[in-house]
Image: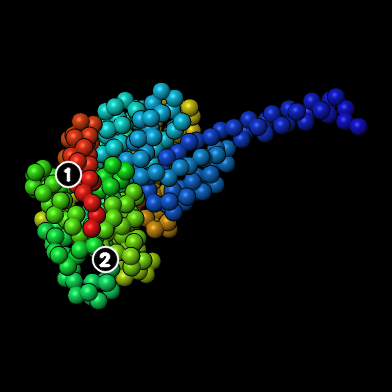
């Protein structure tokens, strides 16, 4: 028979156990799902008192979710994805200021992202925009390997290009902003309308186009180059391309959400993921970006940014709410509304 004293002890133990399990972290991850799952499993293994509820969303989708929940935030921390929507979230008051004790261990570009946002976001990795193409498809169809943005207008590429929708994908928005900065706005939209004749699909996820190319479903995907490298490392016949006119790059970012339900747990993850030890694990999940911790070792497979013609990408302007909304509205009107061939 259970005594009253025994029942009380059991109840107390249950309360302690419940309390221990009650710490949670609600995380949006805007990188490839394998990377997201790697981070969550490693974090929970080293922080057994915190359970992570993770949802994987592309950058544009993540921004939309955070904005929709502004009055009652359901997210504590947003990790990864291009910096532009993170900067817009900061400007819109959706993310919270936080100066991590890890900040002085980061590269200049990562710290610069924090300073630009008023310390409402921070750089976690970087990578250049370009494309990955299926060498076997190109050889079979006699298509010349593209060297420049202008080569993507080649009629031989009709139906062979995939790129994401810039409304949902930070990768595609970076491509849009890059072309505007290289060509001028009207010229960039003229280019995109011409390239549309070669596009078979606008995907939701930024890395999806090169995965389709790897599977032989399309010839070329416009992506961040490290996503193309990831497919090549897995053994697919993918070759990485970098445009001769120059290209933009991303500063993958991380933001704490204003009014988060679990800010203390968010800070624990935030500081943890900025360490060199954690960033050095990323290649194990097929992540070949340049890490933001200055003591971390860039993956040997990562594209050498010093060998790529990078533009002076204006993160402040193209991460601003007004400019981003303006460009996306024009893309919807002039490009996204066009029928696919």
Taking 97 as reference, is 236 above or below it? below
Q: Which mark is residue 219?
A: 2
Q: Which mark is residue 334?
A: 1
**Which sits in the foreground, 4 or 202?**
202
x and y percentages locating residue 69 in the rendered image? 41, 28
**Which residue is depicted at the point 91% across and 32% down?**
1
Disc on the earlier residue, 1 or 2: 2
**Which residue is depicted at the point 43% across and 28% down?**
73
x and y percentages locating residue 161 in the rendered image? 24, 60
**Which sits in the foreground, 288 or 70?**
70
Where the C terminus falls, by quadrant? bottom left
- Circle 1 packing at 10 Å, graded few (<14), some (14-19), many (20+), is some
Distance, label 1 to label 2, CA atoms, is 24 Å
Q: Is residue 5 left or right of residue 212?
A: right
- Circle 2 packing at 10 Å, graded few (<14), some (14-19), many (20+), is many
x and y percentages locating residue 76 in the rendered image? 44, 32
Res 227 quadrant in image: bottom left
Whether residue 184 can be seen here: yes
Res 51 quadrant in image: top right
**Which residue is depicted at the point 14% across and 57% down?**
149
Whether residue 281 can be seen here: no
Which residue is at the far right? 1
């Amino acid at each position: 028979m259970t005594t009253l004293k025994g029942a009380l002890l059991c109840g107390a133990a249950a309360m302690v156990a419940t309390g221990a399990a009650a710490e949670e972290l609600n995380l949006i991850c805007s990188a490839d799902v394998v990377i997201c799952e790697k981070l969550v499993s490693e974090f929970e293994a080293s922080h057994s008192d915190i359970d992570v509820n993770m949802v994987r969303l592309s950058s544009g989708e993540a921004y939309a979710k955070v904005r929709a929940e502004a009055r009652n935030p359901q997210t504590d921390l947003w990790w990864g994805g291009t910096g532009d929507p993170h900067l817009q979230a900061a400007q819109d008051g959706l993310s919270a200021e936080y100066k991590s004790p890890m900040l002085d261990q980061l590269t200049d570009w990562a710290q610069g992202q924090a300073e630009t946002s008023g310390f409402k976001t921070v750089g976690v990795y970087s990578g250049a925009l370009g494309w990955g193409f299926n060498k076997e498809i190109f050889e079979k169809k006699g298509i010349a390997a593209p060297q420049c943005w202008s080569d993507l207008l080649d009629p031989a590429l009709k139906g062979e290009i995939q790129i994401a929708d810039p409304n949902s994908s930070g990768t595609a928005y970076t491509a849009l902003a890059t072309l505007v900065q290289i060509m001028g706005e009207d010229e960039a939209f003229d280019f995109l309308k011409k390239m549309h004749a070669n596009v078979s699909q606008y995907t939701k996820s930024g890395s999806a186009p090169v995965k389709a190319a790897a599977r032989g479903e399309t010839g070329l995907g416009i992506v961040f180059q490290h996503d193309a490298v990831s497919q090549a490392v897995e053994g697919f016949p993918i070759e990485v391309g970098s445009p001769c006119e120059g290209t933009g790059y991303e500063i993958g970012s991380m933001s704490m959400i204003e009014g988060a339900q679990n800010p203390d747990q968010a800070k624990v993850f935030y500081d943890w993921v900025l360490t060199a030890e954690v960033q050095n694990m990323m290649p194990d999940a097929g992540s070949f970006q340049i890490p933001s911790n200055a003591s971390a070792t860039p993956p040997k497979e990562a594209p050498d940014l010093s060998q790529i013609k990078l533009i002076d990408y204006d993160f402040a302007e193209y991460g601003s709410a007004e400019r981003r909304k303006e460009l996306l509205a024009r893309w919807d009107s002039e490009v996204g509304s066009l029928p696919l061939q």
